[in-house]
Amino acid sequence: MDQPILHHYDLSPFGEKVRLAFGHKGLAWRSVETPIWPPRPDTVPLTAGYRRSPVLQIGADVYCDTLLILRELERRYPEPTLYPGGQAGLAAVLSWWADTTTFIAAASIATSIIGDGVPPEFIEDRIAFMRHDFSKAASLRDLGLNRQRVAAQMTHLANMLRDGRPFLLGDAVSAADLSAYHPLWFVRTHAGAEADRLLPFDPAILAWMERVAALGHGTRSPLGADEALAIARAAEPVVLEGVDLDDPSGLKAGDAVAIRSDDANDPIHGILVTADRDEIVIRHESERVGLAHVHFPRFGYSAVPREAASSQAEAA
Ligand SMILES: N[C@@H](CCC(=O)N[C@@H](CS)C(=O)NCC(=O)O)C(=O)O
């Protein structure tokens, strides 16, 4: 089986979530380091326009969004599970809650401390892409707000851990732990001792963080971006079934589509290959890769006809 290839950068909290999933499953994987802000000329040929990080490549199949990346790792490498005790739905929903409520607030707490060292290009890029200002001045201005946001989330974590369970859903680690962990990992790594002053890192949370960190990152070996693209070029995407007739999108295989993400405006385009309950897959061709299949989770992403997407964008 092709080795998983992660396109990511080390600073990325969502990248840490996937690295820990590799650790939990004891996987050997290849690491392609991407720039922290675009242009990313060696990633774009794989992703059909999706710009976020990380992205998982397996042969000529490319998985976008950590929600789907973890699910795909689970499908290919079921043991040990990331969705223990038949709680896949709960783990996924809890993951989404943790990912979406704390990432920006926690990162801003870190930039209120280390913001002077953040390159202006990064700050400008994220203002344009995320409508969020990570400059030190803006992060300091909003520090009280962001401390409250993250502390409120940490209260829920502390409540979940209060009965002495080692992980959020019980005895076994789950995807929910990785999602709740990565923003706190980021703020603690970068804010250092200040993090403990600014946020309620109580002993139960710290002990839980140590358990999650102990999962490690599996066996990582570096891979050049050119080599990763060559691997995709030499591979065939996994063959998939078409689109159900009663799919909620109303679309069918072969339609030209745009993928809409609920919280970003990436211009993602391709030809619909399949759409099932869990994922939408589009075909994407580029000179350096040839044919790739780009996969998106259904939760948070929708496929719309390409023409409708273009006319809506023009009207906006
Ligand atoms: N919902 C996405 C969020 C990923 C995300 O926002 N990642 C950050 C980096 S940690 C990002 O893409 N920032 C903008 C960029 O790197 O271009 C996921 O779960 O993968």
Image (spheres, rainbow, N blue to C red):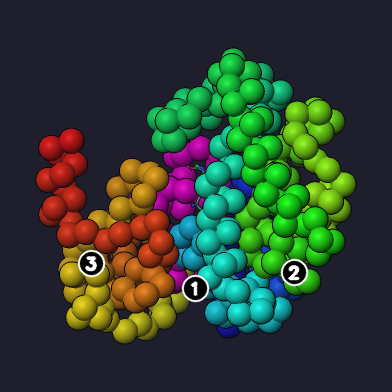
Label 1: few (<14), some (14–19) or many (≥20) C-alpha neighbours in 10 Å: many
Q: Nearer the viewer, residue 292 or 217?
A: 217
Q: Residue 81 at what x, y percent from top left? A: 67, 77
Left or right placement of residue 47 versus residue 146 in this view: left
Left or right placement of residue 193 versus residue 60 in this view: right
Q: Which circle, 1 or 3, is nearer the viewer?
A: 3
Residue corresponding to mark 2:
170
Q: Residue 231 at what x, y percent from top left? A: 50, 70
Left or right placement of residue 245 versus residue 53 in this view: left
Give the vertical position of 98 relative to 272 (above or below): above
- Give the label on residue 97, or none: none
Residue corresponding to mark 3:
249
Q: Which stretch is magenta? A: 34-62
Q: Quadrant of residue 168?
A: bottom right
Q: Quadrant of the C terminus?
A: top left
- Give the label on residue 59, or none: 1
Q: Which circle, 2 or 1, is nearer the viewer?
A: 2
Tell me if residue 56 is in the magenta stretch: yes
For the point 52% across and 47% down, the residue is 100
Q: Residue 95 at what x, y percent from top left? A: 58, 58
For the point 81% across and 28% down, the residue is 197
